[in-house]
Image (spheres, rainbow, N blue to C red):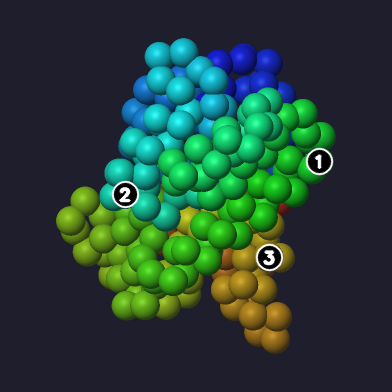
Amino acid sequence: MVDDEPDILEIVGYNLSQIGYQIFTAENGEKAIKAAKEHQPHLIILDVMMPVMDGIEACEKLRAIPELSETVITFLTARGEDYSQVAGLDAGADDYITKPIKPKVLVSKVKSLLRRFKEKSSATGIVNVGDLEINRDEYKIMKKDEEINLPRKEFELLALLTSQPGKVFKREEIMTQVWGSDVVVGDRTIDVHIRKLREKIGDDSFKTVKGVGYKFVV
């Protein structure tokens, strides 16, 4: 989230974090580029009019960064003029949302935009999350130029959790996505696989939400 108005960052950030998204904020385009390089987000929401560096220039610079080639960028701004929207899209944005917008509508829009990210990611078969490179086609994991070998179910569990960092995946959802609804496994199966992933990937990358499930954090 990039906006020079603290109230906007707080309100929008709160509504998105409430449904499990991990939010990073910046108050101008220059800081947005620095944060984007560090966190490699799935989605960037940009204001247009900001000090230091405006959203249009920031968008152009973000689109020139190779590791952010799959990141979805949208503008969220009070400027609704046609020429402003055209400038935003010409700068490389995927969408342009005009303020004011109701929180529930914005959340729905964000979900739709993130589906585009998943489509882009699945098209290449390679996902970069933090210092991990996950090659879904070759079942291959690279961490800082070191290859990590994982059994198939551990790989599928890691691929699921890293598909949306910060999102809490419920145990039922994990079971269905990784093991399938027709397979009967013990209650501790997920916990054992998470423990093994912590040993191989890093303990800090996996967070337990008691009574709910697990999430991957960058």
**Disc 2/disc 1 C-alpha distance (Å):** 31 Å
Where residue 212 appears, as percent x and y from the top left, is: 71, 51
Location of mark 1 (residue): 104
Q: Secondary structure at mark 3?
A: helix
Other-residue count near label 3 (Cα within 10 Å), few / some / many at <14 / 14–19 / ≥20: some
Task: Answer with mark 2 or mark 1, whichever residue precedes in sequence.
Answer: 2
Q: Picture coordinates of residue 200 (x, y %)? A: 33, 57
Q: For residue 37, say whether it is visible.
A: yes
Residue 199 in view in this figure: no
Depth check: 134 or 83 in front? 83
Residue furthest to the left: 145
Q: Is residue 44 above or below residue 184?
A: above
Left/right placement of residue 202 relative to residue 25 reads: left
- Between the residue at mark 3 and the residue at mark 1, the CA separation in whole angstroms equals 23 Å
In the image, 139 versus 42, the foreground residue is 42
Identify residue for label 3.
173
From the image, tell me which residue sits under label 2. 67
Residue found 73% across the figure and 40% down from its top: 106
